[in-house]
Image (spheres, rainbow, N blue to C red):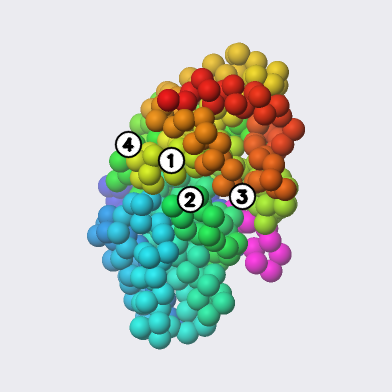
Amino acid sequence: MAATPGRPARRPTRRLVVELGARSYPISIGPELIDDPELYLPHIAGRQVLVVSNETIAPLYIEAVEAALAGLDHRRVILPDGEQYKDLATLNRIFDTLLRERLGRDATLLALGGGVVGDMAGFAAACYQRGVGFIQVPTTLLAQVDSSVGGKTGVNHALGKNMIGAFHQPRAVIADTETLRTLPDRELAAGLAEVVKYGLIRDSAFFDWLEGNRVRLLARDADALAEAIERSCRNKASVVAADEREAGQRALLNLGHTFGHAIEAGLGYGAWLHGEAVAAGMVLAAELSARLGWLGAEDIARIRSLLAGFGLPVDPPRELTRERWLALMSVDKKVQAGRLRLVLLRGIGDAVVTADFASGALRGLLDEIAG
């Protein structure tokens, strides 16, 4: 398509595929994608579509999405915004709409928003009439690089984060990078925490690239953000294709999350953003790795410096006691046979999932950080 006179040419769309056989699906990354019917229509089985969004995102983008759905029977449900609403009570608003509007088994849910909206819409799609299709349209960096890809869906419980959910893959992911222009700085930083995660667990060259492009990313340079999103999605797509249901390798994607989820649940959902809690959690995982002799001081310094440079917390909150930390961390999907497994680092780009660590080392670390 030729550029409009006086306007710069549109940057090309980056495309990749999550390879899951018959359930494979495309990820499209680039600007001005959100109103493109060609990205939606091939992945909508019937004529009924329910757009799920929240009070913050809907006023910005829902009309553009609905314009792309012209000719289809589309409805909408608008949820309150915030991690504190990622619960069964709010989820029922989606089911209420699906049932009230009599949407059938060939209906498609379309998640327009960040990770909370995507997780809840995906979980509703997994459950409604035992499974209907859904499309992810993530509008935050965190959702574009992580939660929209891979099929993990669910809600929180007061006793544990994401402990109620299902694996349900989307039909497509449409990541419009223009939506990041309206993203608050704090939300951008939270997304960058998940970007850093990919460098730490399996891609040391990407970690190096992030160190060299920190200023460009914070300035929201379009090419730098698109590169970061694509490389993150390629890393995640590769892991998901090898281990869709987290029987082994996929658990590496949870670096920092056991500590981070404890922070979120312990302080109350919404007090810290998910990415902020993960950033502090990744530093704790690195510190524990160092206590086990797996990680050197120089690596710790690089990790702390990059995360802090993105404006993320690198120290945990002081409000939690050691006993509270341990209680919250025990409610974790990686616990097996009563043993806590953690994702730890043997180096930047080299993560392992293990229960083979000295409990005294963990307790010693928690004693230092506990209030």
User: How far apart are the alpha carbons under marks 1 and 2?
Assistant: 9 Å
Circle 3 is placed at which residue position? 333
Q: Amino acid at mark 2?
A: Leu
Q: Which residues are magenta?
A: 16-24
Number of labels in the image equals 4
Circle 1 is placed at which residue position? 266
Precedes in sequence: disc 4 or disc 1 = 4
How crowded is the residue under tag 1: few (<14 C-alpha within 10 Å), some, or many (20+)? many
Quarter in which the N terminus is drawn: bottom left
Circle 4 is placed at which residue position? 185
Callout in the foreground (2, 3): 2
Q: Where does residue 168 sit, x and y in percent of width and height?
A: 58, 64
Callout in the foreground (4, 1): 1
Q: Element at badge 4?
A: helix
Toward the viewer: 99 or 331?
331
Callout in the foreground (4, 3): 3
Q: Element at badge 2?
A: loop
Residue shown at the point (64%, 19%) measured from the top left: 290
Residue shown at the point (33%, 72%) measured from the top left: 76
Residue shown at the point (41%, 74%) measured from the top left: 95
Q: Quadrant of residue 263?
A: top left
Callout in the foreground (2, 4): 2
Q: Where does residue 254 sit, x and y in percent of width and height?
A: 59, 42
